[in-house]
Image (cartoon, grey):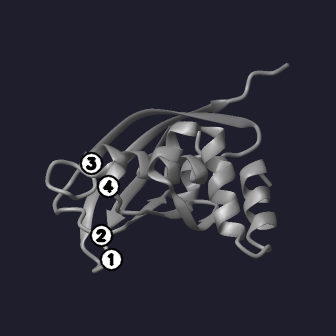
């Protein structure tokens, strides 16, 4: 089991464990902390977190800025990748494509999902589907993050 998934299982068994995990995960890549992600669920091929709507990440119309949302989507993807990538492989993002069909006028739940077969294929391109959903169920951002997954070098 990956270190991230192990940390998730250990911390979520504690009171306030999801908050503890969210803080610890944000320390690994400090830029994630700018959106204060609150992880909700993590398992291989799936990650879900909430980006709270707050003034520090507003745009000029007082909704969540799309780049803050992309940051939340990338945090979800990163947790998913760390929890899913086989131990003999490594991953790196190589592109992101998103559309934002609605205003992000509430907290946004960011979800990342992958096909389990993609991680065991010989094809190094792994596609992670991502979306952000408003409290009322409206999708406000959706797209794909492309990963490059290759064998770890032999040491």
Please name whichever residue, 107 or 125, is drawn nearer the observer in this view of the structure. Answer: 107
Residue 106: quarter of image: bottom left
122 relative to 133, above or below? above
9 or 45, which is in the foreground?
A: 9
Identify the residue position indicated by label 1 in the image.
135
Tag 4's secondary structure? helix
Q: Is residue 140 left or right of residue 44?
A: left
The residue that disc 2 covers is: 106
Task: Measure the alpha-carbon separation of dots 4 and 3.
Answer: 14 Å
Marks 2 and 1, how far apart in space? 6 Å
- x%, y% of residue 44? 64, 60
Q: Which residue is mark 3?
A: 66
Q: Are marks 2 and 1 in contact (CB under 8 Å)?
A: yes
| 120 with respect to 102 (left or right) | right
> Which residue in the structure is indicated by mark 4?
55
Q: Position of residue 118 (x, y in %)?
A: 54, 49
Residue under the point 20% across and 54% down: 100
Instruction: Say which label, 2 or 3, has the lower sequence index.
Output: 3
Which one is closest to the eye, mark 4 or mark 3?
Answer: 4
């Amino acid at each position: 089991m990956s270190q991230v998934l192990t940390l998730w299982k250990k911390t979520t068994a504690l009171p306030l464990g999801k908050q503890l995990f969210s803080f610890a995960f944000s320390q690994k890549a400090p830029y994630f902390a700018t959106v204060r992600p609150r992880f909700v669920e993590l398992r291989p091929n799936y990650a879900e977190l909430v980006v709270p709507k707050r003034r520090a990440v507003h745009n000029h119309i007082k909704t969540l800025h799309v780049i803050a949302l992309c940051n939340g989507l990338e945090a979800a993807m990163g947790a998913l990748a760390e929890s899913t990538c086989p131990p003999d492989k490594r991953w790196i993002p190589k592109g992101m494509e998103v559309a934002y069909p609605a205003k992000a006028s509430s907290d946004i739940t960011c979800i990342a999902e992958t096909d389990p077969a993609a991680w065991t294929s010989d094809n190094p391109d792994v596609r992670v589907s991502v979306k952000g959903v408003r409290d009322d169920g409206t999708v406000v951002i959706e797209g794909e993050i492309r990963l490059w997954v290759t064998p770890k070098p032999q040491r």
